[in-house]
Amino acid sequence: MDINLAHFNTEIGRQKPENIIHKDNACPFCATDELTDIIATDGDIILLKNKYNVIEEADQFVLIEGKNCDIDIPSYSQAHMHRLIAFGMDHWERMRTSGKYETVLFFKNYGPYSGGTIRHPHMQLVGFPSFRQELAFRRSEFDGLVVDERNGVVLSLSTQPRVGFWELNIVPADTHATETIADYIQICVDFLMNAFRRPLTSYNIFFYNEGADIFIKIMPRFATSPIFIGYNIRLLPSNLSEMRDRIRAKYF
């Protein structure tokens, strides 16, 4: 079978808290004194085992980005952003090299179109003991129109998007250039959420690896195009160069 198929436990899924749509619901990540199975911390950044392990073939973990429920990446201080990405990438690498997992997913959902359920800023790590890595992504999806390049890290707009429209790529030649990676992620999220021409409420960040090489994609999320859902046709926008120039003018 040329797909990675996992089983979602709907009984556990029904128990998961949600406060993106129902905003008055309590936030489980704000009640830090009630958190269990904590693995590591860096100040108010917390990595813990996911209480609701809905994917039956995998081990799931949550990375709480900080104590503040009402802000997100664009509002983080540069120091906090650097600590967050260094912490997350370090634990992602530890899981990948532990020998326990064939692949480890590292990603962030934010907003109602992202697939997330909790408003409090967080990321997730998901370890699969059995997973066909070659089906997860293609390197060509990180080809793009270069926006900026520094310290061996390239920021680009994808010319072969995974889904379509304005996907931002970060490709570091040096995987330890975490401060530059963090700066680029913060710029990308700020641009999508605060400087985009249409109102945006949602985005995803996805980390990928192929051996020692890593790739990062920041995707704006809208209602997904039906011709992608139905036919896997990816849409490349006609104003890619304009978007590159707008990002350069605002941030570089």
Image (cartoon, rainbow, N blue to C red):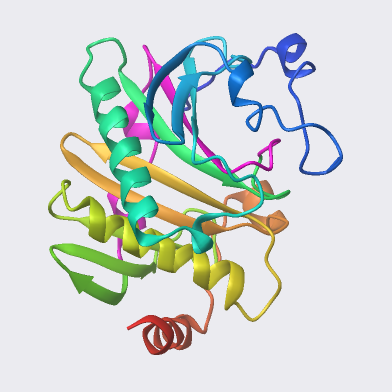
Q: Which of the 4 quarters of the picture holds residue 214?
A: top left
In-image side of 105 versus 239 (left or right)? left
Task: From the viewer's perspective, tell me whether residue 171 is left or right of residue 222.
Answer: left
Q: Is residue 129 visible?
A: yes
Please state the extent of the stretch shown in magenta in the rendering: 116-143
Q: Is residue 119 above or below residue 95?
A: below
Q: Residue at x 42, y 62 (%)?
A: 186
Residue 79 pos. (x, y %)? 33, 55
- Residue 141 to residue 52: above or below: below
Which residue is rendered at x = 63% and y = 57% of the image?
Answer: 221
Q: How many marks?
A: 0
Relative horizontal placement of residue 88, taking residue 28 as reference (left or right): left
Residue 175's spot in the image, x, y percent?
17, 46
Q: Quadrant of residue 213?
A: top left
Residue at 44%, 66% in the rendered image: 188
- For the residue pair 93 and 183, the one nearer the viewer reads as 183
Residue 184 higher or lower than 213, as above or below: below
Measured along the vertical axis of the image, is residue 223 above or below residue 17? below
Q: Residue at x 41, y 31 (%)?
A: 105
The reply to whether residue 2 is visible in this rendering is: no
Residue 126 inside the magenta-drawn segment:
yes
Percent position of residue 230, x then y: 68, 48
Residue 84 in the magenta stretch? The answer is no
Quadrant location of the C terminus in the rendered image: bottom left
210 vs 108, nearest the viewer: 108
Whole-percent x and y of residue 8?
Answer: 65, 17
